[in-house]
Image: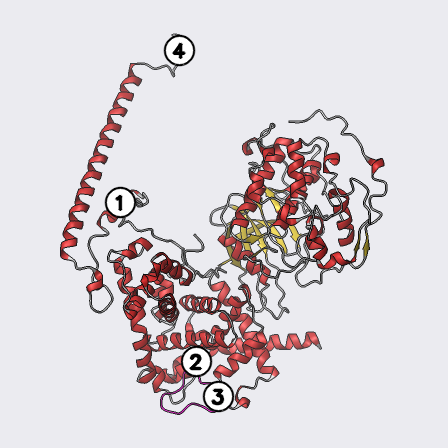
Amino acid sequence: MAYMTNPLATPDQIFHKNSLDSLPTELRDAVFFSTQCLTQAAGILLQLPQSVTAQANVLVARFWLIEPMMSHEFSDVSAAALYLTAKIGPCPCTPRDLSNVYAYLLSKSSTFLPSPNSSLPKNIPDDYYQSETSYQAFHSRVLSLEHLILCSLSFDTTVTLPHPLAITYLQSMDFLNFPKEKITRRVVEYLNTALLSPQMLYLTTQPNGLAVAAIYNAAKDLGAKMPECEWWEVFDVDREDLGFLVVGMRSLEGWAEDMKGDGVLGKRKLGGMITRKDVKEILGSNESQQEEEDPELAMARRMDEKMREIEGGTA
Amino acid sequence: MSSKGKSRWADDEEDAAREAQLKKEKEEKKRLKAEKARKLEAERKAREAAAREQQPPPEESPNGPPSKRRRVSHEPESSTPQNGAPPETTNPSNLLRFNGGTFSRARSVENYDKLNDIEEGAYGWVSRARCLSTSKIVALKRLKTDPKDRSGLPVTGLREIQILRNSSHRNIVPLLEVVVSDSTTPLDPSIFLVLEFLEHDLKSILEDMPEPFLASEVKTLLLQLCSGVAYLHDNWILHRDLKTSNLLLNNRGQLKIADFGMSRYVGDPPPKLTQLVVTLWYRAPELLLGATTYDSAIDIWSIGCIFGELLTREPLLQGRNEVDELTQIFELCGLPSEETWPTFRRLPNARGLRLPSNPTPGSTTSRIRAKFPLLTSAGVQLFNSLLALDPGRRPTAKEVLEHEYFKQDPKPKQEAMFPTFPSKAGQERRRKRETPNAPARGQKAADLGAVDFSGIFAGREREERGGGFALRMV
């Protein structure tokens, strides 16, 4: 059954996610969405298969139900998850490539999540030049986060993606008598979009549910004719779950537009990846800032110690 | 004992009455159950009919998502799980519920009380420990990590965890959980695999046995090994380090495959794989000759080596290095020829091999028959096929399970009837390891260079010997 199922979040974990770190839901969702988008962008630039990047997305989502979001820089969590899934998958990526890609995506020159008010940034290579020190620091952060992610998830890195199941289901329904490529593309688009949803659909539903909901949505969009019986029951999905998933998948696009327009992301002065600093500014409270500072400083100190150790070792 | 001489177990009227009573109760229950089922069925049908009239088909709802739950589907289901019975598959509205478990933070190793060390291998050390909450005895295997390694946690360790987590078979050692040390500074991680504890490994049993395993016992062990390997291969896993010290045995005669530090998932067509796998003495000839695409047949070769070791208590092919190993293989199995292994000339390291130009008759045939005179001909046939030089001619693990050898007398011994052995792992004694270790990741594979095998069969006719006597056959 390992190839059909995923470990799911318990109701308790979902219920307590906001008490992990007292972020307002809106802000939390914005960070979640931006980080998932960042992972996808990095996956594309690193030429990783979507199966690897999607697994990283799911691991990040699981990780943030165990660890407070604010205890590590969001982009580092994304990088560490991607590094980990690439490593255990068929096409590992080198820390150097990873570092370069993230440096670019986080720089002012990148076109990642541009601000709606200003024009697209100019490409200035100096913006994303990585010095040896910053590379080493990034690398150390990724390694320690890799370990933390694994510990937080009990070393269970299994992520079963619904994509292959969806294809199988489509085949069994003869692609709903629709051009194969078109409908499959739409289904895969829905499945990939669902990865970004702060509703964490991949942590609350088994892959068969996601596959069926994506097929349902794609068929609706394209006007393909679905069987007239309750075909989803053949794939062990009940009507209520299907309804919830269908709405969840469809609502994401509008929600993301709103957020980039008047929402959390749109209100910022500059575009690009949201950082912990941004979040703290938005929260605007000095007290919480002081509290958050401590673990970060401790981490930075440990990194420095490690750096010295390494340099001492090689010298 | 009563003086009447009547046994206390004899039937009397009382027993008969009780039996009748029980029978009656049973029938009553049966009747009620049937009635209930009938009622439920009728109810369900009525509801379905009603619903069909009330509810429009979902395709007609305008905005795509079906807005309301249909009441048709789930009433019968909610009444069944009371007694914990799985939903019947015949009922179309009973859906299969997938359960993938949950995820949570790894527990601390402090939940276990370390008892004694068992062994230290190439991939970490293993110790015996007791779980504090359940008092269960487990084996703790520490993953070797190198804080100086800038690629992070070793991918072999992560693969081992991944594969063990996904595997569940009675002949594969179960992974209970993964725990970490409490004092985890993020830069010096200690990771422990909590595995089921088994009292022995086959290697140390074989070393200490005064007499070899009986034929019936060898069959049972081999069957268990092959059924575990068949499961792995069915799931696209290559073990890549099968050897007797990685096979564990408990006191109930159950064999389990352990140490997945070299194993990995493969696909079809096979990906490019590292050729430096499997401990030298169990390494297949195609690996020694530098093949980079190989398949499950390398595990089958190792099974063949283990078969020989079970029969004699001695590792079958104890080469001192790659060339010597290959020499020993050719001495046992015969030199490769166009008939026995048509493709071997194409392997990278085969270029430098110099084989006798006109081989003496018999130098290309296997000597297994002569070396194992006590084995039945079915046994020899199986042995020969496991150690076929051409990987394409080795049987699959599944085919081995069906082999004639296991159907012949003596029949495989029942596991429960297995002898027990004093456990080294359970006592406070460290094992010494004499087998060479599995090759380390990233090492360079040996290039055999030019090797001359032309002389290895020079004096072969002289050493042909008979089987001698043996009284213990069963």
Q: Which mark is residue B80?
A: 1
Chain that bears disc 4: B
Q: Which mark is residue B2?
A: 4
Number of residue marks:
4
Circles 2 and 4: CB atoms closer than 8 Å: no
Judged from the image, the secondary structure of the residue bearing numbered disc 2 is helix
Which residue position is annotated with label 2? Answer: A276
Part of the protein shown in magenta = A108-123
Q: Residues within 10 Å of mark 2 (few under 14, many from 20)?
A: some
Q: Amino acid at mark 3?
A: Ser
Please identify, in this view, whether the residue under mark 1 or under mark 2 is nearer the observer: 1
Chain that bears disc 3: A
Please identify, in this view, whether the residue under mark 2 or under mark 3 is nearer the observer: 3
Task: Please state if B49 lies on the left or on the right of B227 as rendered.
Answer: left
Give the Cα separation between the discs numbered 3 and 4: 101 Å
| Residue at the spot 58% in from the left edge and 45% down from the top edge | B396
Q: Earlier in the sequence, mark 1 or mark 4?
A: 4
Q: Amino acid at mark 1?
A: Thr
Which residue position is annotated with label 3? Answer: A109
- Relative image position of residue B345 (x, y in whole percent): 72, 55
